[in-house]
Structures are given as structure tokens and as C-alpha cells.
Amino acid sequence: MIAIRVEGGLSVGEDVVLRFFPKIAGLLEEIRGRGWSYSFINVEGRAKVILDPSRVTFKLEYYPPSIRDLEDKGQYEIRAEVGDKPPAMLDVEEVKSFEISISAKHASNCITINPVSRTITYISDVLWGLRIGEKRPEKLSEAREIYDAVRFFLNKGYEFKDHYLAERYKELVDLFEKKYRFTVTIELTVEDEGRVPGWEELQEQLSEFFRQRGLLMKIKKRRGTQGLKKPIP
């Protein structure tokens, strides 16, 4: 048997995460107090594990440089396949990042948060159902649990990870709150190509611009094939 250090995704329990992030204990207590359950996902860190060399198969992988920057050098990576049983873990030396997936009574894994960056990283789609094999709300009153969960973390100062989640939240607001809404058509002209952001970045900036002013934005897609084209790269 040999002990090696691994970095990347880890499968660990709540006690291990709390060892490195004790300040989230109060947040977990609040989540339980609202009748929600939770699980830790996407845990990244460093640990020591025990491997049986006779059962390990190593593979050498080569990753070419990005097409966007051909001056970069490619990278080599050695992968170890250890079979269908996980290796024994000696010690977790560090937990760098993680997310918490939260389930309400009628909606499994309906919202995911990153308590370190204080961001909401996932919101399930009320209208199209949840991930396969999970409990989903069957009534609008049950679906409101998802909206309430999002509101809870927004009130605690959490932000959306990207504009797609902001749009998902707008759909929840449209469902569960009678808010005044209106449509504004904006025509943009490129004045300085060097300052124009990419399409994704522009959407993020616009979403944040309006949200800071108490408005939720959603860009309406045009019908047909024209709706699939991005106006800028």
C-alpha cells in the first residue's frame, strides 16, 4: 500500500467541511430551522489517500493548447483508475471550495449556494421540473418553496452567479408576485470595437445594471433561426 496526496474533487462529510469552515455552522442551523435539508457538493480540496499499487491503472493524457491562444503549451496529465471502490482516505489536508445543495419539502435540490463567495449558483426550473429522479412540486403552492428559498438567501445578501439565474429568479417573481413590468426596446450601435465586451459579458453587465436599480431583466429571444444568432461574438 502507498499513501499519496490528491487534489481536486473530494467526497467528504459535513464534519470535514466544518473543520475548515466553522463559520458556516450558524447558516446550517438556519437552514435546518426552516425545515430544509442540505448536502455538500462540488467539494474541492487536498487529501492523502491509500492506494493498492497492484490495482491502479495509470493513463497519460495530453491536452493541446487553447485554440484562442496557440502560443500556450499543451499540458500532460496522469490519471489513475482505482476500480469500483474508493480509496481509503488518510486525512483531508484542505478544503478549498464547496457548494451546498438545499432541498425543500416538495422540491429536492431546488437551490444551490456557495456560502464562501455568497452566491446562488443554481435554481431549479419551476415550469420544466427538476433533475431526473428528484422530488418535484406538483402544485404552484408547492413550487413557491423554491421562490421562498431564493428570497431567503437574497435577503442575506447573496448574489446570483450569472445573469441566467437572475432571469430564472425573474420567472419566479412573475409567478408569485404581482409586480409591475414593462418592455423596453433598446437599439445599440458599436462606437468603439475595442471597448465592446463579449455577448455573455454584456448580458451580465446589463443584468447587474438593472438589478442595482431595483429592476429584473430578461432578454427576449427572437423567433426562428435569427433568434439563435448572437449580435456580437
Image (spheres, rainbow, N blue to C red):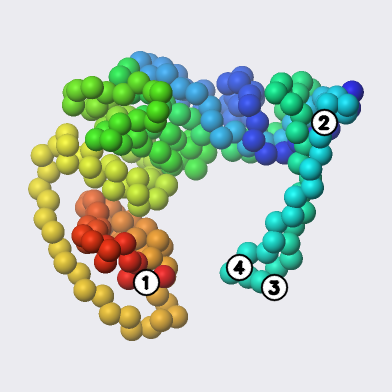
Image quadrant of residue 19?
Answer: top right
Q: Label 4 amino acid?
A: Ile
Q: Earlier in the sequence, mark 2 or mark 3?
A: 2
**Mark 1 sits on what residue?**
232
Q: Earlier in the sequence, mark 3 or mark 1?
A: 3
In the displayed orientation, state which residue is furthest to the bottom.
Answer: 191
Residue 56's disc is 2
* Residue at left offset 45%, top offset 26%: 27
* Residue at left offset 61%, top offset 68%: 67
Give the camera-side residue of 185 and 31: 185
Relative to 200, does residue 178 appear above or below in the rendering?
Answer: above
Q: Nearer the viewer, mark 1 or mark 4?
A: 4
Q: Earlier in the sequence, mark 1 or mark 2?
A: 2
SS type, badge 2: loop
Q: Earlier in the sequence, mark 1 or mark 4?
A: 4
Relative to 4, does residue 165 appear above or below in the rendering?
Answer: below
In the displayed orientation, state which residue is furthest to the front.
Answer: 225
Classify mark 1: residues with Cα within 10 Å, few (<14), some (14-19) or many (20+). Answer: few
How much space separates mark 2 and mark 3, taking CA atoms? Answer: 35 Å
**Mark 3 sits on what residue?**
71
Q: Label 2 amino acid?
A: Val
**Mark 4 sits on what residue?**
67
How much space separates mark 4 and mark 3, taking CA atoms? Answer: 9 Å
SS type, badge 3: loop
